[in-house]
């Protein structure tokens, strides 16, 4: 399969779902044992590293078999790789590791297939929540097989937003506090889920009206970008650039609220 025309995306999606079934069951098995078997910080870190690495090994093996000749950009095995080939998988085997470690069910498996750099298939699978978000370019987005779309709300004051907080680079903390203060006063609230893939999936299906964050990696956002766009939303950088997967920031929103949210975010981070 060397061209988009000869590639059966529906069949590849089935293979992706099968891989998520296996990896999700593996993650839940170990997640349910955390409280009983893991005591020290070192043991916690070793467990998460083990689950991360084994999950990615399984994904890589199955995805490469599903599409021979494809390449991988992944958090564990190829985190420094940014090379785009004809078909490139961008994967995060466990997005939300801190949640996973603390027994919170908000973690996900994120897989995107890029064709010449453009996302064409996506899954954000949430094993503990029993939710699977999928999309094929041009065919819309689905949650557990049912179509969905972005929120239809047109008022910022009626909106619920999502974001992420800095956890290792605090150079732009003042800008974060400025925009958070503004949105606290002018929306129904903000949420920080701890998984950018889930934030984007929730924005795609209308649970959130918008999501924005700095300093994410390609595997955090690649699948979510396609979900939002196939659900009728807009995804850009803070500056409005559509090339967002390898960028340093991301803004996803319903089309009705995009201009006002973009203006507020831009103003805070450009000051």
Image (cartoon, helix red, strand yellow):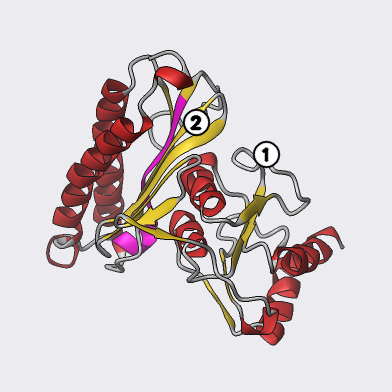
Residue at x-position 33% and y-position 16%: 68
Q: Is residue 246 magenta?
A: no
Along the line of sight, which residue is nearer the eye, 193 or 152? 152
The image shows residue 98, relative to residue 229, as above or below, that is below
Instruction: Classify 10 Å Cα crowding around label 2: few (below 14), some (14-19), many (20 and above).
Output: many
In this rendering, would 20 be left or right of 73?
A: left
Along the line of sight, which residue is nearer the eye, 104 or 5? 5
In this rendering, would 88 be left or right of 108?
A: right
Q: Position of residue 31 (x, y in %)?
A: 20, 59
Q: Are marks 1 and 2 in contact (CB under 8 Å)?
A: no
Q: Main secondary structure of the magenta part?
A: strand
The image shows residue 242, relative to residue 203, as above or below, that is above
The mark found on residue 114 in the picture is: 2
Q: Position of residue 207 (x, y in %)?
A: 48, 71
Instruction: Classify 10 Å Cα crowding around label 1: few (below 14), some (14-19), many (20 and above).
Output: few
Q: Which residue is mark 1?
A: 243
Q: Quadrant of residue 194?
A: bottom left
Q: First in sequence, mark 1 or 2: give its number.
A: 2
Q: Position of residue 195 (x, y in %)?
A: 44, 59
Residue range highlighted in magenta: 88-100
The image shows residue 47, relative to residue 107, as above or below, that is above
Q: Position of residue 205 (x, y in %)?
A: 46, 63
**Which structural element holds mark 1?**
loop
Q: Quadrant of residue 22?
A: top left
The image shows residue 19, relative to residue 66, as above or below, that is below
């Amino acid at each position: 399969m060397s061209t988009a025309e000869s590639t059966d995306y529906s069949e590849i999606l089935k293979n992706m779902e099968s891989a998520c079934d296996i990896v999700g069951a593996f993650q839940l098995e170990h997640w349910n044992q955390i409280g009983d078997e893991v005591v020290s910080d070192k043991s916690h870190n070793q467990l998460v590293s083990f689950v991360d690495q084994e999950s990615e090994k399984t994904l890589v093996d199955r995805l490469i078999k599903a599409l021979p000749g494809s390449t991988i950009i992944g958090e564990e095995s190829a985190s420094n790789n940014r090379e785009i080939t004809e078909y490139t998988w961008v994967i995060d085997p466990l997005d939300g590791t801190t949640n996973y470690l603390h027994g919170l069910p908000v973690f996900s498996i994120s897989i995107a297939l890029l064709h010449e750099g453009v996302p064409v298939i996506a899954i954000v699978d949430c094993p503990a929540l029993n939710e699977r978000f999928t999309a094929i370019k041009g065919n819309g987005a689905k949650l557990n097989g049912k179509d969905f779309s972005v929120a239809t709300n047109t008022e910022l004051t009626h909106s619920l937003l999502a974001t992420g907080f800095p956890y290792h680079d605090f150079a732009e903390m003042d800008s974060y506090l400025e925009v958070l203060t503004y949105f606290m006063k002018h929306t129904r609230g903000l949420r920080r889920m701890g998984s950018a893939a889930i934030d984007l999936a929730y924005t795609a299906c209308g649970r959130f009206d918008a999501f924005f964050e700095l300093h994410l990696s390609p595997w955090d956002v690649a699948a979510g970008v396609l979900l939002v766009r196939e659900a009728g939303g807009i995804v850009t950088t803070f500056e409005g650039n559509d090339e967002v997967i390898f960028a340093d920031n991301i803004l996803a929103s319903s089309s009705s609220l995009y201009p006002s949210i973009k203006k507020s975010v831009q103003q805070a981070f450009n000051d």
